[in-house]
Image (spheres, helix red, strand yellow):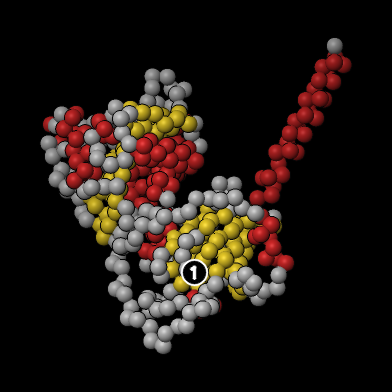
Amino acid sequence: MRKVCLLLLTMLALLGMSLSAEASPFGERVEGLTEITGVRVSSSQDKTRIVVDAKAPVTYRTMVLKDPGRVVVDIKDTWLSPQAKRELAVSGPFVSRVRVAQFDQRTVRVVVETTVGKDNYKIFPLTGGPVPGRVVLDFGRVGPDSAGATIALPDVKAPTKPAAPQTKPTKPQTKPQTPQTKPVETKPAETKPVETKPEEQQTPQDAEQAAQETAADTPGEQPATESSTDAGIAAITGLAGHSITIDAGHGGNDSGAIGPTGVTEKSVTLRVALALQKILTSEGATVYMTRTTDTEVSPKGAAASDIEELQARCDVANQHDSDIFISIHMDSFTNGAAKGTTGYYYALGSKKSRDLADKVRAGVIDQIGTPSRGTQSCNFYVVKHTDMPATLVEVAFISNPTEEKLMNSEDGVQKAAQGIADGIADFFG
């Protein structure tokens, strides 16, 4: 019997070593590398802008290749997220296609197929804002005084005199809130909403082919700080030009659910809503808030009935003709083991509401790692009485000790807000 036990222990030890050996290579491979989380593209009459998102500031080098014309950007000490799109078709005169691949163990390569000359593209890094590190690639009218100028494409001659510059966009403005009379409206610089093409199947060999061709290296520029550049980046997510109403659930006399350690639902929803407002406005959306402080929304305050309070929240969205309505809540159950994220939409509402609920739920789960409880139909007042696609998202269970702790942390709040923003961008994209 003793020999049998020793044999079993030996086999278990060997199995554990085998599993460990199989699980470790990925972690070792990406250790010390920065994750490239995605690539976004915006195309307009004047310019195509490509933004590569990273979890930290990055360095890179550029190459120019011919036959066909390509601009290649090698981003050093990075790895490509499995969720990032590998190929994007672009509609516009400046760029036809963008391909992204893990070129080698420490380099992510971006290949832009373009016919513009060297004076009509610009590549620069950007730090600050909602994304820690970004590499921006502009193709088209890239100079501050080049608005209206003709691009020097191979078969187009540049004019001798450029047209007069267009009026520069105004800076984002935030109107102060009077909680019991008017909602807060945050307006970005004016930009047009942009549609992005769906992901297509990538051929990795195409991106790697550029490595075998001769090219001159161009060092990356020094990182730029957050500036008016973000007014242009706003268009990339597809959020620019859209109006969004954010409803922080509960507030004032209504605390909502209360967690095991006393954390209130109304405090968590407000923190997430404010963080979401900041992200969305930085990306070019106009945002209306049902509340920005711990207060009721109805002009009657604490004296309002439940229906009057809920209707006041709907009125904010309806009166401003918002494109979508997002109501943020925390779930609760008598059993503290219940956990996860749920997206709700009105049972008799539009297919767009279901799509919005599904994408917002998925975005939250991607960011905070909660289990999915699915996208479900409901009869909740605020999604039933709003005139646009609407969702109520139960971010997590405040009655679950682990999820209460997560959502009471700054990291949890920021990630939840980013997840909702990602879902909204996906919905408009």
Taking depth in this image into account, of 212 and 188 the one nearest to the observer is 212
Q: Would you place residue 300 above or below residue 56 in this image?
A: above
- Single out the residue that lies furthest toward the right: 3
Could you tell me residue 262's position as x and y percent? 35, 29
Taking depth in this image into account, of 57 and 351 the one nearest to the observer is 351
Could you tell me residue 154's position as x and y percent? 53, 78
Residue 418 visible here? no
Image-quadrant location for residue 106: bottom right
Could you tell me residue 116's position as x and y percent? 52, 74
359 sits to left or right of 222: left
Please give the name of the residue rendered at 37% of the width and 53% of the height, measured from the top-left corner: 239
* Crowding at mark 1 (Cα within 10 Å: few <14, some 14-19, many 20+): many
Say which element carries label 1: loop
- The residue pinned by badge 1 equals 94
Residue 307 visible here? yes
Taking depth in this image into account, of 297 and 241 the one nearest to the observer is 241
Please give the name of the residue rendered at 31% of the width and 75% of the height, measured from the top-left corner: 166
Taking depth in this image into account, of 153 and 75 the one nearest to the observer is 153
Please give the name of the residue rendered at 55% of the width and 46% of the height, measured from the top-left corner: 83
Please give the name of the residue rendered at 23% of the width and 34% of the height, measured from the top-left corner: 385
Q: Would you place residue 340 above or below residue 176 in this image?
A: above
Image-quadrant location for residue 232: bottom left
